[in-house]
Amino acid sequence: MDVESRMDLFLRPPTNEILTVDRLREYLETGIPLRHYIGFEISGFMHLGTGLVPIHKVVDLQMAGVETIIFLGDYHSWINRKLGGDLDTIKKVAGGYYVDVFSRMIRSLGGDPGKTRFVLASEFYDEYGLKYFENFLKVSMSTTLSRVRRSISILGRKMGESVNFGQLVYVPMQVADIFSLGVNVAHGGIDQRKAHVIAIELGDKFGYKPIALHHNLVLGVGLTQEDAVKIREARESGDKDRFVDTVLNIKMSKSIPETAIFLHDSQEDIRRKVRKAYCPPDDVIVNPVFSMLENVVYPYIIRRGLEFKIVNLKTGSESSYSSIDEVREEYLRGGIHPLDLKNAVSEYLWMMIKPVSEYLREGPGRKYIEELESLGITR
């Protein structure tokens, strides 16, 4: 595969940005082997924003010849008090539900789970030993406390919220993870940007500068018109951090089940949730349905060589679109009704999720649902 084809796989949706594109091109042109990682907290049921959007990029990077790693942050989840702050439970859920569902989602999206390495943080630290602690100290000594606090949004917390000291070490741990794993493609949602920038700035201390790849966050289907105004204002301000922090408050979240589409949702669940979503006819930027089209549906369509098809409920006619730009233009000129867009997006979501959903609801994977429900985790 040539350099331009590999660049396209890095840059296409749901990618938001790459820091930096020039360094990526240099690495590709000089043939430097690329090792990627994306880290996940173990925090309950997976939805589109955790189990599907980032996996699109994992599959893209597999296709681009990149070594891919999914890093399961059990200690990170423990620090952030996930699953009741019980480390044994976190490890069990990570090694069972998370590995199994991620593997199945990779396969459903056209990738090969055998080409992605799953690494449990605690096992990696045990294996890597004192060298990891040295890297952690090197990062900590090169980063100010105020810088760490400004990066606290990766914990899902705002600057003004109270955190314990353990949560403050989360950021240098994450940066140390990157260099200890030998990663030169650090991947995450745009909420990971601040920590990844620290890693890039400290690159000289570790002998190389990693690339940071950030994907978009999917807007929650519970977004309101008031929320939309806040996002537009933050976007128009030109302040990237303000925009990211605003979106973080309104992204798809498992803590509010009706705002999230879970990987175990039924077809009817998906249709119901998408139908209730805010979907203004004159806006494709602050629009949860278009957010799902662009970041969830469209990557699947282009990978499969499909067209996006919409049925007009009023006339029964079907229209096909070869690019998302065509859909965007047609929607903004009033040629696509919001309800027709919702119905089409729902069908494609189900097409992707169906194998995993049926496995979790009706197959052997049901045990994972029961396990998490027994812990008081809601859908």
Image (cartoon, helix red, strand yellow):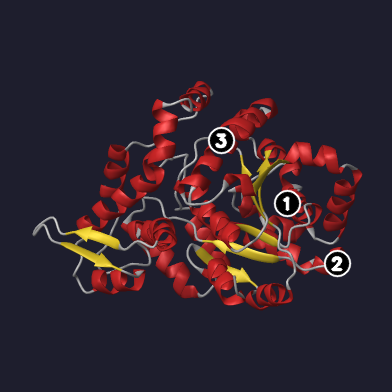
Q: Tell me which amino acid carries mark 2.
A: Gly
Question: How far from the left and from the top, in percent, is residue 173?
Answer: 76, 49
Q: Mark 1 or mark 2, which is nearer to you? A: 2
Q: Tell me which amino acid carries mark 3.
A: Asp
- Foreground pick, 75 / 67: 67
Label 3 vs 1, first from the N-terminus: 3
Disc 1 is placed on an element classified as helix
Q: Residue at x 41, y 58 (%)?
A: 304
In the displayed orientation, state which residue is furthest to the left.
Answer: 315
Q: Residue at x 61, y 54 (%)?
A: 153
Which residue in the structure is indicated by mark 2?
Answer: 207
Q: Residue at x 43, y 26 (%)?
A: 363
The answer to whether 83 appears left or right of 128 in the picture is left
Residue 100 is labelled as: 3
Residue 76: quarter of image: top right
Which residue in the structure is indicated by mark 1?
Answer: 174
The answer to whether 272 appears left or right of 356 in the picture is left
